[in-house]
Image: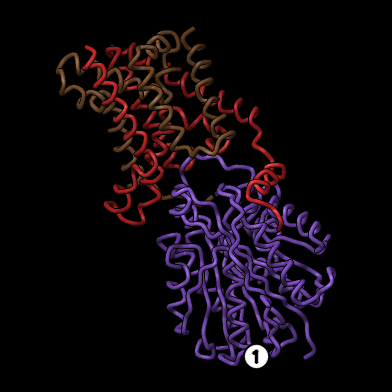
Amino acid sequence: MTYLWAFLIGGAICSIGQILIDKTMLTPARILVMYVVLGVILGSFGVYEKLIDFAGAGATVPLTGFGNVLAKGVKEAVDKDGIVGIFTGGLTASSGGICAAILFGYLGALFARSKEK
Amino acid sequence: MNMSKKQYKKYVKTKVTKSPLFKNMIKAYITGGIICTAGQLLNDSYLYFGFAEEQAGTLTSITLVFLSAFLTSIGIYDKIAKHAGAGTLVPITGFANAVVSPAIEFKDEGYVLGVAANIFKIAGPVITYGVIASVVSGLIYYALG
Amino acid sequence: MQTIILNNKPRLVSCASIAGKKENDGNMSEFFDAIILDGRYGKKSWEEAESEMQKDAAFMVLHKTENKPEDISFIFGGDLLNQCMGTSFGITKLNIPFFGIYGACSTFCEGLILASMCVDGGYGKKVMCTSSSHFCSSERQFRFPLEYGGQRAPAAQWTVTAAGAALVSDSGGDISITAVTPGKVIDLGISDASNMGAAMAPAAIDTIKTHFKDRGLKNNYFDMVVTGDLGKFGYSIAKEKLKEEGVDLSNRFYDCGAMIYKEEQDAHAGGSGCGCCASVFSGYIFDMLKQGKIDRVLLVATGALMSTTSAYQGNSIPSVAHAVSIERVRK
């Protein structure tokens, strides 16, 4: 059942992005920024966790989920470390994904060249 | 041509074919849905192999980033994305593609000023605004808590 | 008067074109002098490949006309890359005095105008003009990395991988540049970089209208009026508006960008770039002139003069169109 919800919710979040691509002049970078910030906002109100509870990866895999990780991380860090947590929480929680992107990006550049279309 | 900028813009709109929104949305829905379902499968597999919930989530992200980086490097991700649109843009794989593709493209300018300097050329704003938003949310949480 | 009549009738002696793989799969393949099947052309970067193409196009013209580099008075060349690096790095090997020019995709006609004026005025006996564009070098400068997963809008155009070169001389052959109309920069407020055809159409309309008016020509004077790279949509805008304003070109009106690719090649609205007009003219149109299938052509290359900086700063796209009238004259 989780798989069906992951497909349905994940697909829905993506197709909203398609409306933004086709109907507005927003560049992809702006759309991604909107998703992340929206994820942080929904995450800090605790709303996004509820979506994750039944949609699972359908909510965590889209970039709004990345925003939620940032918001959740900062909350936990503030609980643990107080004011310092405001600075450390977001990046600590999201470090896995960012580090992987940098590492695999670099490795990609080592082994691949851009290809003609 | 006797047309104001406004009139011309309006006229141009009537001449240009629009993107097939409905078709594009369906394609985005399906690809986005599949990527999320794959994420769910990965997540459940990591849980099955005994990882804690938090770790399984992080490992899922890392695996998806790796797969996207691999498909980007061999020149397939952009071919899927041409059809999938937001279906491959919005998931974390789209973020990874935005990091890996400039790294590969700017290899010609060297590993420091090319690869490293351009790696966040497209995805940098996502991290910048994500972090700033998290700091604001942390500040409010701290002040209220 | 905006149009300059060239009384000494400088001759367009020879042209050469070299194009990429996608262009070879398109409608114009049989007319190109050479094809590069590897986009890097054996070089280490896309930019160097573009330079090499432009150099080769220039050498092909020299070869065809049995000229040596030292026979050429000077060369007008340009491309889309920052500081015209595509041209200057290729032209180095020719050892010919060089003027770098930038008119975005209108560069080829800009070069033809300057070259023919120089010859007409007696400042040079043989003057060459070259221009080029490369899909891969343009993408990385103006848009996204090649491996980036983006979607193109229906009105987006595909930068042509090609180079063209032409030789203007005071004598030789019966094909002459009879009049030229340098265009004004026109901006009708289009800021969508994926709809450059619409941004450039007003400039093309203005230049074509001016050329007909200045010379007092009838609408059926030219066998072909060919715009550079308006693409499908820009072309239909220009055609419709020209008709409304009294210059009804009906089936004499063509666009290089709309002609170069086949529908199934997924190039959306068509080709663009300096190499588009340069290669289609040097290949197809010049061939038709030489074979006597047509006698009079008005070539109107169009250029969208935006930069990545101006686009980020939210400016609209100013455009220019330069017209060159090429006609058969008595020997």
Residue B25 relative to residue A83: left or right: right
Local secondary structure at mark 1: loop
The chain painted purple is C
Measured from the top left, where is residue B23 in percent x and y? 65, 29
Q: Mark 1 lies on which chain?
A: C
Is C76 on the left or on the right of B144, as rendered? right
Task: Tell me residue A5's x, y (percent).
Answer: 50, 11
**Going by the image, does C213 lie left or right of C29?**
right
Image spot of residue C225 (x, y percent): 75, 67
What color was chain B assigned in the picture? red
Q: Which chain is brown?
A: A
- The reply to whether residue C28 is visible in this rendering is no
Q: Where is residue A67, by image quadrant? A: top left
Please determine whether, in this image, residue C255 is positioned above or below residue C297: above
Front residue (pair B85, C298): C298
The amino acid marked with disc number 1 is: Asp
